[in-house]
Image (spheres, grey):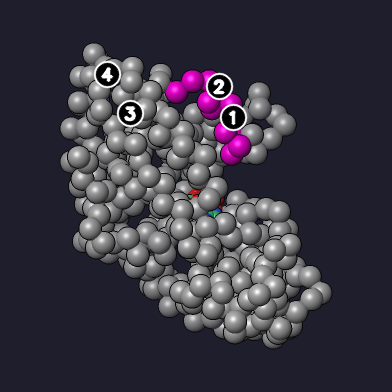
Amino acid sequence: AFTPRVFSGIQPSGGLTLGNYLGAMKRFVEMQGQGFETIYCMVDLHAITVWQDPDALRRQTRELAAGYIASGIDPEKSILFNQSQVAEHAQLAWIFNCVARMGWMKRMTQWKDKAGKNQENASLGLFAYPALMAADILVYHATHVPVGEDQKQHLELTRDIATKFNHDFKTDFFPITEPVIEGAATRVMSLRDGSKKMSKSDPSDASRINMTDDADAIAQKIRKAKTDPDALPSEADGLENRPEARNLVNIFAALADQSVDDVLRDVGGKPFSEFKPMLSELAVAKLSPISSEMARLMQQPDEIDAILRKGSDRARAIAAPILKQTYDIVGI
Ligand code: ADP
Ligand code: NA
């Protein structure tokens, strides 16, 4: 039996968004102290699969660390570290590059989306990204991975890699990891385009709420968020065919720790002009303590660096023996 162990990561490829917070970070915090060992990572090796300015990357990595801690990741309860500081991730990823099949990788929708029309000019790293992600998870024998819905396919690939490795080498060395995709906000959508997810890499800043946005920016973005002309639906009418309303109600429910039905019972029948200020007020109330704590932590880079150094030592202590055993199984 495998130790109940949670692993997840976030890319330091830009400022954190409300999507990252509700779909990932807030849930990482909730899984602390629930009978799991919790390991959380800044996945800088994933970030550089597309171009990153080195100075911006350094700043964003520290800001992400501050975001983790300010959101409630306790570096005593959880292992918090930077991916590139634990070489075992990249080492196991190479083994998995030799396990995963080209055809599996070509089917990944994130690869197709991010590479766009010009696949020939995408980095080899972007193509291999999901094998590195499998290594991130399996180098800890993680049993559970909390993620947003956009990562579901990559988690399936992780399970496929573990299954093929176990089968090829006649072993049960790697666990078949469970994705944990739960809550009202597993897919927070862009505020400007209901067909796209909210993302830190979206060129439009109005499309997302950043964790570091101030109250005015949050209120303005929510006020301008795309909606339809009707009032909010009742619980009975529901959110079917109301993508913009669904998105805003999901965000409200996740921020308030309520069910979508509870929210609709309260706000059904209200016009958006009444609901949006309620949502802004709630978002500001939840996010502003986090962003001020982030700003405070950013003034103490040495403290952050010390936390991450300690985290990477603890992470390596788990990963190194698992990598060594993997090499033994493979015959290298
Ligand atoms: P981004 O797409 O913003 O660059 P990452 O790829 O670093 O974010 O994802 C970090 C975590 O945040 C993942 O678990 C991912 O599923 C989650 N996540 C990202 N965007 C959203 C979103 N819009 N809604 C819910 N979860 C999200
Ligand atoms: Na993503």
Circle 4 Cα neighbour tier, 10 Å, few/some/many (<14 / 14–19 / ≥20): few
Marks 1 and 2, Cα distance to the nearest angstrom? 7 Å
Of the residues shown, which amino acid type is indicated by label 2? Gly
Marks 1 and 4, Cα distance to the nearest angstrom? 27 Å
User: Which of the two discs, 1 and 4, sits closer to the camera?
Assistant: 4
Circle 3 Cα neighbour tier, 10 Å, few/some/many (<14 / 14–19 / ≥20): many
Horizontal side of 139 relative to 271 (left or right) equals left
Circle 2 Cα neighbour tier, 10 Å, few/some/many (<14 / 14–19 / ≥20): few
The residue tagged with tag 3: helix, strand or loop? helix
Q: Quadrant of the C terminus?
A: top left
Whether 108 is among the magenta residues is yes
First in sequence, mark 3 or 1: give its number.
Answer: 3
Marks 4 and 2, Cα distance to the nearest angstrom? 23 Å
Q: Is residue 104 above or below residue 180?
A: above
Is any part of residue 292 visible from this angle?
Answer: no
Q: Name the spot of residue 300 as percent of width and height, x first.
A: 33, 66
Marks 2 and 3, Cα distance to the nearest angstrom? 20 Å
Marks 3 and 4, Cα distance to the nearest angstrom? 18 Å
Q: Main secondary structure of the magenta part?
A: helix
Numbered circle sitting on residue 107? 1
The residue tagged with tag 1: helix, strand or loop? loop
Numbered circle sitting on residue 170? 4
Instruction: Tell me what residue is drawn at x 53 percent, y 20 percent.
Output: 102
Name the residue carrying label 2.
103
Name the residue carrying label 3.
92
Of the residues shown, which amino acid type is indicated by label 1? Arg
Circle 1 Cα neighbour tier, 10 Å, few/some/many (<14 / 14–19 / ≥20): few
Most extreme residue toward the top, as rendered?
A: 331
Quadrant of residue 87 within the rendered picture: top left
